[in-house]
Image (tube, rainbow, N blue to C red):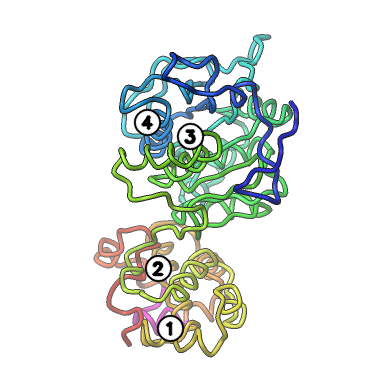
C-alpha cells in the first residue's frame, strides 16, 4: 500500500496508508460515487458493548448521505465476526448478518486492505477475567485459563494479518484487549476507560495505557475508551477523510454538542462533581490509575502540571486534606472493597494497595475504619454497604471530612 502525505490534523505524523476507497470522491448530486471516501470493517466480539458500536457506526451513517437517508455513499461499513454468525451484544441485541473473517480450515482471510480501518468492538470481560475476581485467583481457574483454547484465536490471527498488511486498527472499549493479545500494540500507547484501567495494567504490565482522555491516535493504531467517546473518534476520522462539515453534520443530528478532541478528559466517578479545579481533577485521575503503586507528592504534582505547594493548596481547598492523605484514603477504600469481595489474604491486599507490609496496612486500616481488616471481613452489614465498585468507594462521609 502506498504511503500517504502528511495529514493536516497531524503535521508530524503521516496519515494511515489510503486504500482505493479513500481515493474516490463522493458526489451525490450526480448519483452514487464509485468509491466511498471512508471504508470501515467492524470486527464484533462476543457480548460487544452496544453503545460505542452504535455511536461509531451512526456517525458514519449520518456522514455518508444527505439528510438521514442512510445510503452508503461517502462511507461504507461492513460487520465481521469470526465465523460469520450473528453476534449478540452484552445487552442481548443481535447484529446480523455478519461476514466471516475467514482464515480457519484453509479458508482465505477476508481481505482487510479493502478497509481504511478495522474497528474492533470489545465486549464484557468473561468470567474470571477481571483482575480482582476471586475465581481468577483459584488454582482451578488458573489451570482452566492456561489449558483452554483461545476463544478468539481466529480474530487475533486476522488482526495480526491486517497489521502486517499495514491496515490501521482501532480498538474500542475492551477491543484494546484483543489488539494487545494479538501482539500488535508493542511500543504503542493505548486508551482505556478508567473503569478498566487497573485491570488492563495488571494483566498487561508492559503496555502503556492511559485513562485520562477519550481516545489516542498512535498512527495506525487508534484506541478509544468506549461509550459515547466512540462518536468523537468516529467524527475525528470522518473529518480526516471527508471534511469537518460532514463530521459536524453527524454530531448535530445525533444531538451531540460538538466534537470532543482525543485529549478531552474522560468523565470520572461521582467525586469529580465536587472538583472544579482541573489540576485537582487530573491529579485524582492519576491517583486512581496508581492504586497499587503510590506516587510521591512531587511526582504527582509534576504529572498534574503544578508545583508541589500549589497542588497541596488546591487539594486542601477541594477536600480539606492534602494529596498524600487523599491518596492513602483512596487506597484504603480500595483495600476495603478487596477485603469484602475477593478471597485475597490481608497481606496480599496490603501489597495490592501499595502498603509496605501487613502491619503498615493494618495500622492505617484500623485508623480509617475503626476495626482490623480481619474483623471487618466478617462483618455482613459492612459488606452490604460496600457493595459497589471500588472506584466509587471514595465518595462519602470519611474521605476529606475528618
* Magenta residues, start to end: 363-373
Asked if residue 278 is positioned above or below residue 86 in the image, the reply reads below
Q: Distance between the residues labelled 1 and 3?
A: 38 Å
Asked if residue 2 is positioned above or below residue 127 in the image, the reply reads above
Of tags 4 and 3, the one toward the viewer is: 4
Q: In which quarter of the image is the C terminus?
A: bottom left
Element on which disc 2 rests: helix
Crowding near the residue tagged with mark 4, few <14, some 14–19, many ≥20 C-alpha atoms within 10 Å: many
Crowding near the residue tagged with mark 2, few <14, some 14–19, many ≥20 C-alpha atoms within 10 Å: many
Question: Which corner quadrant of the image does residue 4 belong to?
Answer: top right
Check residue 315 in the rendering and tell me which mark sits there, or answer none: 1
Q: How far apart are marks 1 and 4 (CA)?
A: 44 Å
Left or right, residue 342 beside residue 209? left
Mark closer to the chain start, 2 or 4? 4
- Give the residue at mark 2: 336
Q: How far apart are marks 1 and 2 (CA)?
A: 23 Å
Amino acid at each position: 500500500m502506498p504511503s500517504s502525505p502528511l495529514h493536516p490534523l497531524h503535521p508530524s505524523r503521516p496519515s494511515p496508508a489510503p486504500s482505493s476507497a479513500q481515493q474516490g470522491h463522493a458526489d451525490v448530486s450526480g448519483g452514487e460515487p464509485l468509491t466511498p471516501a471512508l471504508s470501515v470493517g467492524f470486527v464484533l466480539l462476543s457480548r460487544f458493548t452496544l453503545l460505542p458500536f452504535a455511536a461509531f457506526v451512526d456517525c458514519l451513517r449520518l456522514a455518508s448521505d444527505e439528510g438521514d437517508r442512510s445510503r452508503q455513499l461517502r462511507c461504507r461499513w461492513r460487520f465481521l465476526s469470526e465465523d460469520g454468525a450473528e453476534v449478540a451484544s452484552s445487552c442481548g441485541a443481535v447484529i446480523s448478518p455478519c461476514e466471516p473473517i475467514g482464515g480457519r480450515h484453509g479458508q482465505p482471510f477476508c481481505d482487510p486492505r479493502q478497509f481504511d480501518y478495522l474497528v474492533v468492538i470489545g465486549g464484557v470481560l468473561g468470567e474470571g477475567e477481571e483482575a480482582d475476581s476471586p475465581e481468577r485467583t483459584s488454582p482451578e481457574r488458573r489451570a482452566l485459563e492456561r489449558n483452554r483454547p483461545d476463544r478468539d484465536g481466529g480474530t487475533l490471527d486476522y488482526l495480526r494479518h491486517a497489521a502486517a498488511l499495514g491496515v490501521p486498527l482501532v480498538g474500542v472499549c475492551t477491543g484494546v484487549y484483543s489488539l494487545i493479545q494479538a501482539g500488535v500494540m508493542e511500543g504503542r500507547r493505548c486508551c482505556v476507560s478508567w473503569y478498566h484501567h487497573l485491570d488492563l495494567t495488571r494483566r498487561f504490565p508492559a503496555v502503556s495505557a492511559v485513562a485520562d482522555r477519550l481516545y489516542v491516535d498512535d498512527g495506525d493504531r487508534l484506541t478509544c475508551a468506549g461509550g459515547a467517546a466512540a462518536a468523537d473518534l468516529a467524527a475525528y476520522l470522518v473529518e480526516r477523510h471527508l471534511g469537518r462539515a460532514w463530521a459536524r453534520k453527524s454530531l448535530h443530528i445525533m444531538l451531540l454538542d460538538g466534537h470532543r478532541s482525543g485529549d478531552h478528559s474522560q468523565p470520572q466517578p461521582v467525586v469529580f462533581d465536587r472538583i472544579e479545579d482541573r489540576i485537582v481533577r487530573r491529579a485524582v485521575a492519576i491517583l486512581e490509575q496508581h492504586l497499587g503503586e503510590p506516587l510521591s507528592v512531587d511526582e504527582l504534582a509534576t504529572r498534574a502540571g503544578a508545583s508541589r505547594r500549589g497542588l497541596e493548596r488546591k487539594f486542601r481547598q477541594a477536600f480539606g486534606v492534602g494529596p498524600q492523605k487523599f491518596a492513602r484514603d483512596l487506597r484504603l477504600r480500595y483495600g476495603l472493597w478487596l477485603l469484602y469481595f475477593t478471597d485475597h489474604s490481608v497481606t496480599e491486599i496490603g501489597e495490592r494497595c501499595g502498603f509496605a507490609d501487613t502491619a503498615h496496612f493494618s495500622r492505617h486500616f484500623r485508623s480509617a475504619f475503626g476495626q482490623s481488616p480481619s474483623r471487618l471481613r466478617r462483618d455482613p452489614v459492612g459488606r452490604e454497604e460496600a457493595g459497589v465498585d471500588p472506584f466509587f468507594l471514595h465518595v462519602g462521609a470519611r474521605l476529606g471530612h475528618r
